[in-house]
Image (spheres, rainbow, N blue to C red):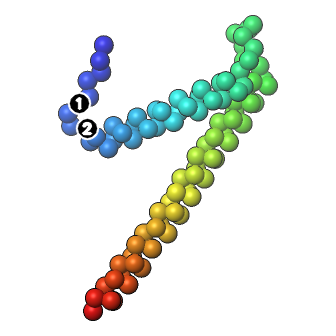
Amino acid sequence: MAMQVPTNVDPEQIKSVRDFVASYNKLIETCFLDCINEFTTRDVKAKEETCALNCMEKYLKMNQRISQRFEEFQMLANENILAAQKKLDSKES
C-alpha cells in the first residue's frame, strides 16, 4: 500500500524528514550490529544497553561535529566568494 503525501506539504520538509529517518535508521542499524549479540533471552543485558547508549552518544556527537565543520566550511567558502567578487568589482571600476 503506497503512502499518499498531502499536496500542501513543502518538498523541502519531505526531504528533511526522509533525511532524518535515513540517519536514524543508520544509527539504529550500526549500534544494533555493534552491541547486540546475545539472542538467547528476551532481556537486554546491561553490557548491551551500555554499549548501545555509548554508540548512540558517539554517533550523535560525530554527526553534530560534522555539521559544525560543514557550516565552518560554508562560511569560509562564502567569504572567499565575496572577496573574489569585491576584487572583480574593484578591477572593473
Q: To which residue does mark 1 refer?
A: 6
Relative to the observer, which residue lies in front, 93 or 68? 93
Q: Amino acid at mark 1?
A: Pro
User: Is the N terminus in the top left, top right, bottom left or bottom right quadrant?
Assistant: top left
Q: Amino acid at mark 2?
A: Val
Q: Residue at x 46, y 37 (%)?
A: 20
State the separation of the CA atoms marked 1 and 2: 6 Å
Q: Residue furthest top?
A: 40
Q: To which residue does mark 2 refer?
A: 9
In the image, taking residue 14 as reference, residue 83 lies left or right, namely: right
- Circle 2 residues within 10 Å: few <14, some 14–19, many ≥20: few
What x and y, as percent, mark residue 76? Answer: 49, 69
Q: Residue at x 25, y 38 (%)?
A: 9
Relative to the observer, which residue lies in front, 8 or 72? 72
Q: Residue furthest bottom?
A: 93
Q: Residue at x 65, y 24 (%)?
A: 32
Q: Residue at x 53, y 53 (%)?
A: 67
Pointer 1 with pointer 2, Cβ within 8 A:
yes
What x and y, as percent, mark residue 35? Answer: 72, 25
Instruction: Establish if 41 lies above or below 75.
Output: above
